[in-house]
Image: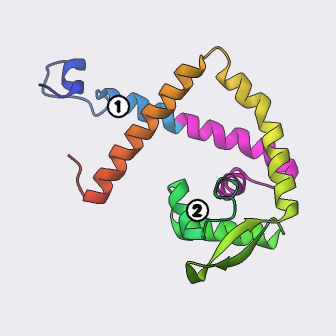
């Protein structure tokens, strides 16, 4: 059985690196990421946030105060150092604090302060109509399938990276 891309491209040996069907998907994901960052930055700027800070607050909310910086970074697929920098900025702004971690003496748990919770809730309220418009016309089933497909692709890519393989 041939890989999917060999069925989709010309049989010419001089294939373009853009012939693989996954490349169109990757390019669209990059574009979507850029659009989300631009939209998010504009949306949460009045709240004193950036998309990056909002994303970290979302991960903290997801963990409900049970995540260390390392766990937040893993949850977000980012480097721990990048997330640490943003958490430090959020702490300086009074949006997050730290609590003892029963599982680790040095790795504190990151928690939202009451102010951080209010800001996160407001950002979520501002986002809802945009999310509704973005998903408009798509069935819930389609959105869930897209999410599942993206998660599967991410998992395969992470497995390859973990194995040091490009196969």
Q: Quadrant of residue 98?
A: bottom right
Say what secondary structure mark 2 lies in.
Answer: helix
Residue 87, position in %: x, y?
A: 69, 68
Q: Is residue 123 above or below residue 146?
A: below
* Residue that protrudes farthest toward the bottom in the picture: 105
Q: Is residue 83 left or right of residue 43?
A: left
Q: Quadrant of residue 107?
A: bottom right
Q: Between 57 and 40, which is closer to the camera in this rendering?
A: 57
Q: Residues within 10 Å of mark 1 (few under 14, many from 20)?
A: few
Q: Range of the magenta residues? A: 31-59
Q: Is residue 51 above or below residue 16?
A: below
Residue 135, position in %: x, y?
A: 65, 23
Q: Nearer the viewer, mark 2 or mark 1?
A: 2
Magenta portion: prevailing SS class? helix
Q: Is 33 part of what is drawn in magenta?
A: yes
Q: Between 73 and 39, which is closer to the camera in this rendering?
A: 73
Q: Is residue 140 above or below residue 166?
A: above
Residue 111, position in %: x, y?
A: 73, 66
Say what secondary structure mark 1 lies in.
Answer: helix
What residue is at 65 percent from the left and 53 percent from the top?
Answer: 62
What residue is at 51 percent from the left and 39 percent from the top?
Answer: 30
What residue is at 65 percent from the left and 72 percent from the top?
Answer: 109
Question: Between marks 2 and 1, how big is the CA–CA gap?
Answer: 28 Å
Residue 36, position in %: x, y?
A: 65, 39
Q: Between 47 and 73, which is closer to the camera in this rendering?
A: 73
* Residue holding disc 2: 72
* Residue holding disc 1: 22
Q: Is residue 55 left or right of residue 125?
A: left
């Amino acid at each position: 059985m041939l890989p999917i891309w060999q069925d989709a491209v010309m049989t010419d040996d001089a294939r373009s690196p853009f012939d693989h069907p996954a490349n169109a998907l990757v390019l669209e994901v990059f574009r979507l990421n850029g659009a989300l960052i631009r939209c998010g930055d504009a949306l949460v700027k009045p709240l004193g946030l950036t998309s990056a800070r909002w994303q970290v607050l979302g991960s903290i909310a997801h963990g409900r105060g049970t995540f260390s910086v390392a766990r937040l970074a893993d949850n977000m697929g980012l480097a721990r150092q990048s997330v640490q920098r943003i958490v430090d900025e959020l702490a300086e702004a009074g949006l997050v604090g730290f609590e003892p971690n029963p599982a680790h003496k040095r790795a504190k748990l990151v928690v939202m302060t009451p102010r951080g919770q209010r800001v996160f809730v407001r950002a979520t309220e501002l986002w809802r109509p945009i999310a509704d418009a973005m998903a408009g016309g798509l069935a819930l089933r389609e959105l869930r399938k897209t999410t599942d497909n993206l998660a599967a692709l991410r998992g395969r890519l992470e497995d390859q990276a973990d194995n040091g393989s490009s196969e």
